[in-house]
Amino acid sequence: MIAHLPALQVVITLIAAPACILVRGRDFAVALTASWAAFAVSCLLLDRVLAEGVISYELGGWAAPLGIEYRVDSLNAFVLLIVTGIASVVLPYTRSSLPLEMMREKTYLFYCAFLLCLTGLLGVAITGDAFNLFVFLEISSLSSYILISLGPHRRALTAAYQYLVVGTIAATFIVIGIGLLYGATGSLNMDDIAARLPATGYDRTVIAAFAFLTVGAAVKLALFPLHFWLPKAYSYAPSSVSAFLAATATKVAVYVLIRFLFTVFGIEFSFETLPTAAPLMLLALLAMFVASTVAIFQDSVKRILAYSSVAQIGYMVLGISMVSAPGLTASILHLFNHALMKGALFLVVGCIAFRQSSFRIDDLAGIGRRMPWTMAAFVVAGLSLIGIPLTAGFISKWYLILAAFAHGAWWLAVLIVASSLLTVIYVWRVVEVAYFRSPTSGSVAAEPGEAPASLLVPTWVLAGLNVYFGLDTTLPVGIAQHAARALVGAVP
Amino acid sequence: MGFFGLYNYWIVVFLMMVGLYIVVEHGNLIKKLVGLTIFQAAVFVLYISLGKVRGGTAPIIVEGVEVYSNPLPHVLILTAIVVGIATTALGLALVVRIREAFGTIEEDEIEDQDGPVI
C-alpha cells in the first residue's frame, strides 16, 4: 500500500471522476472523499520524501527509462501538497457556491471536470516521463476549459474558447519540444534525457527543443507578455474555479518550467550556454510592474485579482532567473504562499457573489459593514498579498529580497519593494470602498447579511493559514530550501 | 541529405506556419479551430517522421529483416491524436454554446456585443 502511494496519488481522483457521473446524487460526497484522500496521500508522500529522500516508482512494474517512472522529490511532493490542499479546501466551498452559478442538477458534471483537472495537475507534478507530462497537462487543461466555461456570464464561454486556443498552442509547443528532445536523445524519461544530453553536443535540435519547451511553459504559467488569456479566464470563471485554478494551475506550470530548466536541461546549458536568465528576469520585472499597474486601474475585484496573479507570477519567475539556491527557495516558497493568498482572495469574491451579482468596485461601497467576516478575510489575505510582516506574503518577499542581495543586486531588492507598493494601492482601493464609503442609493441590489458559514469556513481556513505560515515558517521554508539545494546540485 | 532530403520536415514547418497563421488571422471561431487542427496535425507528421529509420521496415518481426522503424513515436502520436480530437470536440462544443449565447461566431461581432461587464 505504502509502496504504491505515487500511483494512488493520481489514480484515486482519476477513478472518482467518472464515479461522480455514475452516482449522480452523491457526486459531492465522492468528489470530497477523493480529494481529501488525495490530500492524505500527498501528506504521506511528503513525509516519506523528507525522511527517506527521492521516491522512484515504476508504473506497471516496467523499469525506467523504458517504462513510465513516477519520481517524487521534495519539490514535486511540495507542489502535490499545494494542489491537493487547495482542492480539499475549495471543494467543500463549491457545495454552496455552485448552485448560484449553475444549474443544480448539472453539478455532477462540474465535479467530474474538477476531479479530472485535479488528476491532470497531480499527474504533471508527479511524473518523471516527459510525454506523460504532456498527456496529464492536456487532461488538466481540457477540464479547466470546461470549468471556466461554466461561469455565470456568457463571456465565460468566449474566455474559455480563447484559453482553449492559446492553451492548445502552448501544449503543442511543449509536445514539439519533447519530440525534438526524444529525437536528440532517444529517451523520454527526464533523468535519462538529462544524462544523455551532454553526449548530443547540444546541437540545434536541442536548442530548438529548449525554446519550444520554455515558451510553451511560459504561456501556461502566464508569464508577461503571454498572460493575455489569464485575466479573462479568471474573471469570468465561477469563483470557486478561479480560486482553484489561480492557486494551482499556474503553480504547476511554474513547476514544469523549473523542472525543465534545472533538472532536464541542467543549469549549465539553460543559463550558461544560452542566455536565459536575463530575458526571464526582464519579463518577470515587467510582469511585476505592468500587471500591477494595470490591476490598479481595473473596475472589478475579480479583474484586479486576476492581473495581480500575473504580477505575482513575476516574483516566482524572478526567483528562478537568479539561478541560485536562495532565489529558487524564494520562488518555491512563493508558489506555496501565493496559493494561500490568491485562493483566499478568490474565495472572498465568491462570498460576495452569494449576496450580490456585481463585483464592480463601486458596488462594494459599505460592504465591510454588511459582510464583516468576508471583508476581514479579504483584508488578511490582502495584507499577505502586499507582504506585511506576520503574514505568509512577508516571508516570501523577505526571502526574495535576501536572494536579491545574495545575487549582488541591491537594485532588485528596491524594485521588489517598489512593486509591493503598487500592490498596496490596488488592495487599498478595495478596502477603502468596502469600509469607508457608504452605500449609494443607485448601487446594485444586494441582499443584506453575511455569507453562510459553508462559504466562510473554507475562506477563513485559507486566510488563517496566511497568518499561521507568516508566524511558523519551518515547514514551507525547510522544504523550499531542501528542494532548491537539490535543484542547483548542491548536497541537500 | 540536402534540402530535399529533409523534405518531410519542410512540410511540417509549412503546415505548422499555415495552421498558426489561420489561428491568428481569422476572426471566425470555426476557422480558428481548423487552423489549430492543422497546427496539431503538423506535429503528428513531425513525430511520425522521427520514427522513420532509413531502410527500415514496419516494426513487425519477420525473418530476414534486420532494420525496423521505431514504433515508439507512432504510439506516442496515437495518444496525441486522441488529445487533439478531444480538444477539437471541446472547442466545437464551446462554439455551439457561443452561437447560442451571442448569435454569431465572428470574433469582432462578439466583441461588440456587451461592454466591459463584471
Image (cartoon, coloured by chain):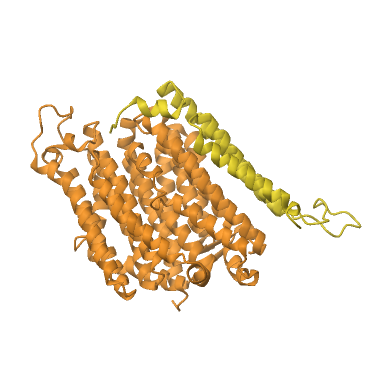
- Which residue appears at 45% of the width and 35% of the height? A161
The quarter of the picture where residue A152 lies is: top left
A425, A390: nearer the viewer: A425
- Toward the bottom, the furthest residue is A491
A19, A79: nearer the viewer: A79
Total of numbered circles in the picture? Answer: 0
- On screen, B101 above or below A289? above
- On screen, B102 above or below A84? above
Q: Position of residue A477 (x, y in %)?
A: 33, 68
Q: Position of residue A218 (x, y in %)?
A: 45, 54
B48, A353: nearer the viewer: B48
- Residue A342 in view (yes/no): no
- Name the side, left or right, on which A288 lies relative to A79: left
State the hue of chain A.
orange
Q: Which chain is yellow?
A: B
- Toward the front, the furthest residue is B3
Q: Quadrant of the C terminus of chain A?
A: bottom left
B43, A84: nearer the viewer: B43
- Residue B13 in view (yes/no): yes
Q: Position of residue A373 (x, y in %)?
A: 17, 44
- Which residue appears at 24% of the width and 34% of the height? A354
- On screen, A86 above or below B28? below
The quarter of the picture where residue A279 lies is: bottom left
